């Protein structure tokens, strides 16, 4: 295992319900450290660009509308095996399939309003971190 960085979003369903602290507590409890963080209201262009890989999917327009429906918290997490660890703590994309004790099982409202996003691999992590943060904004 190595120390890695991964990218995380706390989504509008979670900011709306004022549970960002509860979610960060789960991440920190798993040994992940928040080394960069900001609260932002994504523009349509930012959301479309971030999720460009999904642009042909049937849910793309709804996803962009949801992600711009309220503020999000974008953050960089650091720790041993951070990419896999974050995905483990988040649980499956669809909360109905998420394991007990995961963020999505406990907090998500639906597959769309699923409270958190996390990078799915090292290349994605690098691209997604750079999409929102300058290297100087990341303080380990
Ligand atoms: P996320 O990890 O942010 O990546 C893409 C998002 O699309 C995903 O989480 C879900 O919230 C959302 N989404 C909405 N509908 C679907 C679907 N049918 N399959 C996969 N992802 C979906």
Image (cartoon, grey):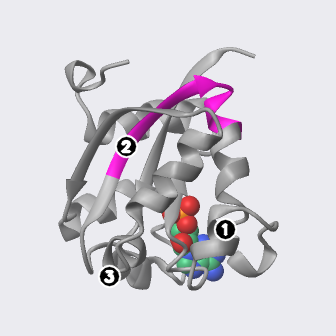
- The answer to whether the residues at label 2 and label 1 have Cβ atoms under 8 Å apart is no
Of callouts 1 and 3, which one flags the residue occurring earlier in the amino acid sequence? Answer: 3
Task: Measure how far apart labels 1 and 3 are at the Cα level.
Answer: 18 Å
Residue in view at x 70 percent, y 38 percent? 84
Q: Quadrant of residue 80?
A: top right
Residue of label 3:
65
Callout 1 secondary element: loop
Callout 2 secondary element: strand
In the depicted structure, whether residue 44 falls above or below residue 123 = below
Residue located farthest toward the top when viewing the structure as drawn: 2
Of callouts 2 and 1, which one flags the residue occurring earlier in the amino acid sequence? Answer: 2
Q: Is residue 130 visible?
A: yes
- Rendering coords of residue 135 (x, y %): 27, 20
Q: Residues within 10 Å of mark 2 (few under 14, many from 20)?
A: many
Residue of label 1:
93
Residue 56, disc: none
Task: Measure how far apart labels 3 and 2 are at the Cα level.
Answer: 21 Å
Q: Nearer the viewer, residue 43 or 82?
A: 82
Residue in view at x 50 percent, y 69 percent? 115
Q: Does mark 2's beta carbon lie closer than 8 Å to ligand 1?
A: no
Image quadrant containing the C terminus: top left
Q: Is residue 35 left or right of residue 68?
A: right
Extent of the magenta region: 74-84
Q: Main secondary structure of the magenta part?
A: strand
In the depicted structure, whether residue 115 falls above or below residue 62 = above
Q: Is residue 57 visible?
A: no
- Rendering coords of residue 81 (x, y %): 68, 27
Residue in view at x 75 percent, y 63 percent? 101
For ligand 1, give the image quadrant.
bottom right
Q: Does mark 1's beta carbon lie closer than 8 Å to ligand 1?
A: yes
Residue of label 2:
75
């Amino acid at each position: 295992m190595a120390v890695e960085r991964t990218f995380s979003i706390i989504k509008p369903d979670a900011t709306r319900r004022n549970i960002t602290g509860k979610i960060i507590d789960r991440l920190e409890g798993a040994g992940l450290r928040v080394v960069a963080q900001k609260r932002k209201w994504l523009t349509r262009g930012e959301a479309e660009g971030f999720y460009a890989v999904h642009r042909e999917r049937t849910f793309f327009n709804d996803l962009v509308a949801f992600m711009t429906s309220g503020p999000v918290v974008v953050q960089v997490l650091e720790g041993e095996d951070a990419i896999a660890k974050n995905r483990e703590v988040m649980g499956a994309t669809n909360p109905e399939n998420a394991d007990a004790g995961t963020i999505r099982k406990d907090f998500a409202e639906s597959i769309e309003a699923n409270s958190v996003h996390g990078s799915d691999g090292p290349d994605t992590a690098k691209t997604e971190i750079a999409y929102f943060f300058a290297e100087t904004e990341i303080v380990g």
